[in-house]
Image (tube, rainbow, N blue to C red):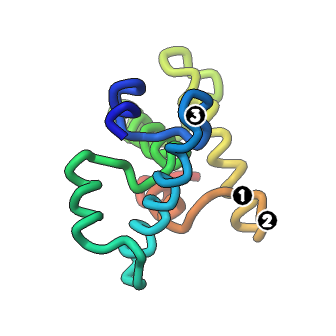
Amino acid sequence: QKSSVDSFRNTIVPTNIPSNPSLVMPVETKRHSCKINQNGDSSLLIENRIQLLNNVDVQSEGPRLQSWKISYEELLTFVKEFGHVKVPQRFPSNPSLGMWVNTQRQSYKKYLKGDSSSKMTEDQIQLLNKIGFE
């Protein structure tokens, strides 16, 4: 795993690594076990292994969720600066934020309709609602 840290400058192991595909499955298994453990369920990953992973800062969340959290933090910065969550779709100073907010609105609508293609989690919806997301 140290080679992943050296190569990518972080411990967020992508779900597909052409140069080292054998690293993906163990990390995904550990992420899954950590998530089970955090929910209070039994896990094959014993406590000292979790501590070892925490010591090297292996992310228990996949890259997609990490990316979501980064974009959410950018949205919080926008809210602090402008006082609202209505990011223009073509926001000049951060175009990716405008697109991300638009995608969240679409996913949120799908979620409310019970559409299984929405990848939003209950936690994400609560975070967005907390800041007045529409």
Find residue 67 and report its horizontal and vertical position in percent: 49, 40
Q: Secondary structure at mark 3?
A: loop
The one nearer the camera, 88 or 74, is 74
Tag 2 near tag 1, CB within 8 Å? yes
Image position of 15 with respect to 77: above or below: below
Kindly identify the residue that appears in the image at 29 percent across and 55 percent down.
53
Question: Left or right: where does residue 50 sit relative to residue 11?
Answer: left
Query: Which class describes the residues within 10 Å of circle 3: few (<14), some (14-19), or many (20+)?
Result: few
Give the CA distance from mark 2 to mark 1: 6 Å
Kindly identify the residue that appears in the image at 55 percent across and 43 percent down.
22
Query: Which class describes the residues within 10 Å of circle 2: few (<14), some (14-19), or many (20+)?
Result: few
Give the CA distance from mark 1 to mark 3: 26 Å
Tag 3 near tag 2, CB within 8 Å? no
Image position of 112 with respect to 65: above or below: below
What's the amino acid at mark 1? Answer: Ser
Residue at which label 3 appears: 17
Kindly identify the residue that appears in the image at 45 percent across and 59 percent down.
31
